[in-house]
């Protein structure tokens, strides 16, 4: 991903952050502790992945977990739409359905893309598919050393690595590209997802990312989403009709 693509992706993400959280991307990336930032930025990955298969709604009351003002209801009929099935999101989900790490973490292989999406259900579920697919690559010692070196170089140069603008003109901007070039199931993801992966890793550090990523399994996440406590699902309140 070259700098013009990265700049365009950051602008798209800033617009998305305004729509979802009523904050700029920089505010989302720099506000609160690292868990709060990770969850809110990660949810934006899920929104991007889910968009072609969902209908959005606005809420005056933000969600409890990430303070999102917009929700996304999954539309299973969309999976019969030819335009949707040609999208990079659908093609990426098709790859994730067969990804060995995703299948192992789920404990079963979904029969089709619609089933995979239905199991994810919420934006955070789609985000966790990406996490599980890339964590073994990202968290191996050689890659960790390479990525940590890029982030530390940006920090030593005086950049605030939490700030998304840091990605333009520094080596840290190559992190997401490194992932999609080496994780087969993520080879088709759009530039905003690459940018968000880079922002999250630079923002909280690869050690924190790997510790969190390895503590989450998809089978456990699905169980939490189905529990009476909806904080994992993080849905804002739909409008009353």
Image (cartoon, helix red, strand yellow):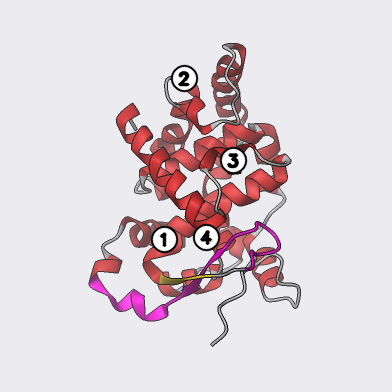
Q: Give yes or no for contact between labels 1 and 2 (Cβ–Cβ under 8 Å).
A: no
Q: Earlier in the sequence, mark 4 or mark 3?
A: 3
What whole-number distance in Å separates the C-alpha atoms at marks 4 and 3?
A: 23 Å
Q: Which residue matches tag 3? A: 27
Q: Is residue 213 magenta?
A: no
What whole-number distance in Å separates the C-alpha atoms at marks 3 and 2?
A: 20 Å
Q: Is residue 65 magenta?
A: yes
Vertical order, 14 against 83 (above or below)? above
Vertical order, 56 against 128 (above or below)? below
- The residue lying at 62 percent from left, 69 percent from top is 235
Depth check, mark 2 against mark 4: the one in front is: 2
Among the 4 quarters of the image, the one containing residue 124: bottom right
What whole-number distance in Å separates the C-alpha atoms at marks 1 and 2?
A: 30 Å
Q: Earlier in the sequence, mark 1 or mark 3?
A: 3
Q: Is residue 167 left or right of residue 88?
A: right
Of 72 and 200, nearer the camera is 72
Q: Which residue matches tag 2? A: 170
What whole-number distance in Å separates the C-alpha atoms at marks 1 and 4?
A: 9 Å
Q: Which residue matches tag 1? A: 93
Do we see residue 119 in this rendering? yes
Q: Give yes or no for contact between labels 3 and 2 (Cβ–Cβ under 8 Å).
A: no
Q: Earlier in the sequence, mark 2 or mark 4?
A: 4
Vertical order, 57 against 158 (above or below)? below
Crowdedness near tag 4: few (<14), some (14–19) or many (≥20) residues, C-alpha within 10 Å: many
What whole-number distance in Å separates the C-alpha atoms at marks 2 and 4?
A: 29 Å
Q: Which residue matches tag 4? A: 126
Residue bounds of the magenta highlight: 61-82
Depth check, mark 1 against mark 3: the one in front is: 3
Crowdedness near tag 2: few (<14), some (14–19) or many (≥20) residues, C-alpha within 10 Å: some
- The residue lying at 60 percent from left, 23 percent from top is 160
Q: Quadrant of the N terminus?
A: top left
């Amino acid at each position: 991903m070259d700098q013009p693509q990265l700049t365009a992706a950051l602008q798209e993400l800033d617009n998305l952050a305004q729509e979802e959280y009523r904050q700029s991307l920089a505010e989302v990336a720099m506000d609160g502790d690292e868990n709060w930032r990770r969850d809110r930025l990660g949810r934006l990955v899920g929104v991007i992945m889910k968009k072609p298969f969902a209908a959005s709604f606005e809420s005056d009351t933000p969600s409890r977990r990430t303070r999102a003002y917009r929700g996304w209801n999954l539309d299973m009929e969309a999976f019969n739409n030819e335009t949707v099935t040609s999208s990079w999101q659908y093609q990426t989900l098709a790859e994730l359905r067969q990804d060995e790490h995703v299948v192992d973490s789920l404990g079963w292989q979904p029969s089709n893309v619609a089933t995979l999406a239905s199991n994810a259900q919420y934006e955070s579920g789609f985000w966790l598919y990406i996490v599980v697919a890339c964590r073994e690559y990202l968290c191996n010692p050689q890659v960790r050393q390479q990525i940590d070196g890029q982030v530390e170089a940006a920090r030593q140069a005086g950049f605030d690595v939490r700030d998304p603008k840091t990605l333009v003109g520094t080596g840290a901007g190559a992190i997401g590209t490194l992932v999609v070039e080496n994780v087969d199931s993520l080879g088709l993801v759009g530039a905003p997802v690459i940018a968000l992966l880079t922002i999250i890793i630079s923002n909280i550090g690869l050690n924190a990312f790997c510790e969190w990523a390895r503590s989450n399994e998809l089978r456990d996440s699905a169980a939490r989403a189905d529990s009476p406590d909806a904080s994992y699902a993080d849905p804002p309140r739909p409008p009353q009709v």
